[in-house]
Amino acid sequence: MATSAVLVEAAEPDFYHAATKHKGILSWILSTDHKRIGILYLATMLVFFFTAAVLGVLMRLEMLTPGKTIMEPQTYNTFFTLHGIMMIFLFIIPGMPAVFGNFMMPIMIGAKDVFFPRLNLFSWWLFLAGGLLALVSVFLPGGAADTGWTFYVPYSVRTTTNVIPAISAAFVLGFSSILTGLNFITTIHRMRAPGMSWFKMPLFVWALYATAWIQILATPIIGITLLLVGLERLFGVGIFDPTLGGDPVLYQHLFWIYSHPAVYIMILPGFGIVSEILPVFARRTIFGYKFIAFSSLAIAFVGSLVWAHHMFTVGMSNTGMFVFSFLTFLVSIPSAIKVFNWIATLYKGSIELEVPLLFILSFIVQFCIGGFTGLILGTLSINIHVQDTYFVVGHFHYVMFGGMGFALFAALHYWYPKMFGKMYKKAPAVVSWFLLTIGFNVLYFPFFLLGYLGMPRRYYDYLPEFQTLHQISTVGSWILFTGLVIMFVNLAVSLRRGQKASANPWGGETLEWKVPSPPPHENFHEVPVVTTGPYDYSKYEHVVQEAK
Amino acid sequence: MTSSVTAVAQGHVHRDDVGTKLGMWLFLFTELILFGGMFIVYAVYRFKYPTEFHLAATELDTLVGTVNTLILLTSSLTIAMSITSIQEGKKGLSLLLVGITIALALAFLVNKYFEWGHKFAVGLYPGSPELLNRPVGEILYFGLYFVMTGLHGLHVIIGAVVLAVMMVFIAKGTVTMHSFVRLEAGALYWHLVDIIWIFLFPLFYLLH
Amino acid sequence: MEHGEQQQHREEAHVVSYGRLFLIWLGLVALTGITVAFAGINLGNWIIITAMTIASIKTLLVLNVFMHLKFEDRMFRIFVLVALATLLIFIVLTFFDYAFR
């Protein structure tokens, strides 16, 4: 994207060293600078992520043998509940928008911050409060919630564990998510630089825009639903109580009306980062820009119509089930369109196998596996057999972790030099990628087999015939965790010891690569004027031609 | 939501009132969907228990409901008028109109207080023995009644507080003839509270 | 809409007159009266459709005039439609289950 602005004064300090109203830690936790807020989210999120990951590793240890291995059944129930709550509400849903959306999006559109900077800070405080509330719920009398992250009634109303703190945490986190979405929509509509029409926006911004609409329109439903569960527990209102005429299936409808679109909140920004990284490391413009942009909106829309595919075995009407199964098949189409366009972008590109691209390649394969198994689950006749088995658990880990998780790792390695001004060492990063990919697949692929063979999910105990696959899977978790540790240690050590990074180490064409690494406080010295699209690699065309 | 500032390189500061209003409208959408979830629950249970809903609705006082509707409709008028008056530079009139809006809100809440009080007095509240004796359709009706009017009442209180803050802004000169997007935002919130009641009223009070 | 277009700092051009606001209020009060009157007639299942239709008309009045939607940028109206359509879809699809059980 050609710009006509002089973008940097060498003497201007980066945002870490800019003059601030407060000093010390207050200059961070009271900062309204979108870049600092993005890093605040990253730091707090990593704490929650690692806690939840450790819970996962411990769960896999327990599943090494049938019966008790290292913990009691009740503990296991609280572990998978907390693992789900933390990974979903504290990591994957906020993840990409809160960290990279906050840090990068304003720069990518040529703005100096988001539209409501103070609201942005408030969003982070809500995030922190929600996370602490979730952790505190573990230690209050009554013990951690054991309902699963889905809080299904009637159990969530009757269990004596700390459901109310847990759902309050989810409520607060939902509010944080809503405010971020509100901020992003307003920012994208009102603060784009002169010349940046909608179709000159980077695709990551399109992805964040579509995501923000889901955040606004879907999240309030989970708010009201969890509020009702709380009221039910406190006052016995009866709305979901079958003995009082209530319908537990109605709870599930309301729960999934949010929680299905929520998975698109999770994955759409991941799709966005794929569309950012591929052009840079294939040295060519993205194939089918408008298709990818519109498919994000299509996914947001159609994805809001499919929620009851989580409920095929609960006793809905046949008509309802046919409609939702059909709509579920439909939602795969825009996702597939993206995959085709990505492959086409790579085809005959001048490939640079840098670390971000490695993670994206794993993403594409793993997301496709996740997506295909989603179609399998959406098929009514098959769903009867594999619903509530490990097959489902395999499916969603492939899309959420193998997909979105890996996209986050890719984004981390892509934007690291911009955010921290340093470059990490490539060798350990490649090793970590390798271990993560191998570990991930060894951990989760057996889940499809286990589920197909009949192993139910959320079960502490199991028949001996499932043990071998469980053991293979647990070994995978160790490889995966090792990869995680190496990756984060490499990134952490490089903060101090890494080489200083230039403004544009990867040769990207979007606006964030036109400002220093790290950027100064207001991002740009002058408002940039945009004249071309975001993936203009025409200057490299001659290189590709000569190489043939 | 306070108006935000987009600065341009020359240090020249611009306000974007359209953007601020956009932010407020987006927030209103979330409130719409929040109450919308309750409307979904209402729709399903009314579909399942139409007779019991009719029966239970006879316990509500249509007159009080109608009066409350008129109170809120009038309050929407007065807050809308307060914007017209601030645009005309009539600070005192604007203050008065916002004040009347708050007074109407309080009147609504007083009515609600007595309505609920009367229900409690005859033993109609969630979990009460009297209620649990009734058919499940009626239990659900009253459960929905208390939750939905309660949630709405909470929003009336929040709205009244927001409007009180607006009065402070007008008095102090933060909101003026040339800069009143805050008041507009507060008014938008208030109108939404009115719209929710416009739907609640017939669904609970006019069933028979 | 781009940054450049917002460079002009325009005053709020449109003022809704007290008279117009009052007329809308009268309309709202009248419609309320009609709803209450209809409730007295035994319309069976039609009462809900009638009541909801009248409520929707009242809402349109509040949205367009009191909330200024008619005089705002077209984008706002599109967004309101999107939000309402979303809620409608949630209700309709839920009833694909309940209406056919």
Image (cartoon, rainbow, N blue to C red):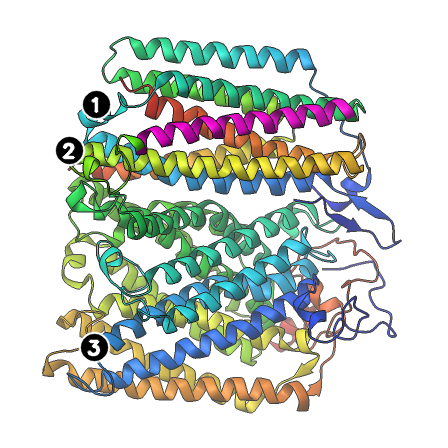
Q: Are marks 3 and 2 in contact (CB under 8 Å)?
A: no
C21 relative to A480, above or below: above
Where's residue A450, x and y in %?
19, 75
User: Looking at the image, can residue A283 be seen?
Assistant: no
B164 relative to A119, above or below: above
Amino acid type shown at disc 1: Leu
Dot 1 lies on which element? Answer: helix
Measured in 3D between alpha carbons, the distance from the residue under mark 3 to the one under mark 1, in whole angstroms, is 47 Å
Q: Which residues are magenta?
A: B92-120
Asked if residue B100 lies left or right of residue C93, the reply is right
Residue at x-position 19% and y-position 67%: A389
Determine if the magenta segment contains residue B119. Answer: yes
Q: Write down the chain letter for disc 1.
A: B
Quadrant containing the C terminus of chain B in the rendered view = top left
Determine if the magenta segment contains residue A6. Answer: no
Depth order, front residue of B193/A3:
B193
Of the numbered discs in the image, which one, if any, rests on residue B135? 2
The residue carrying mark 1 is B55
Outermost residue on the front side: it is: B121
Q: Write down the chain letter for disc 3.
A: A
Task: Respond whether the residues carrying marks 3 and 1 are from the same subunit.
Answer: no
Q: Are marks 1 and 2 in contact (CB under 8 Å)?
A: yes
The residue carrying mark 3 is A73
Where's residue A241, x and y in %?
21, 47
Dot 2 lies on which element? Answer: loop
Q: Who comes first in sequence, dot 1 or dot 2? A: 1
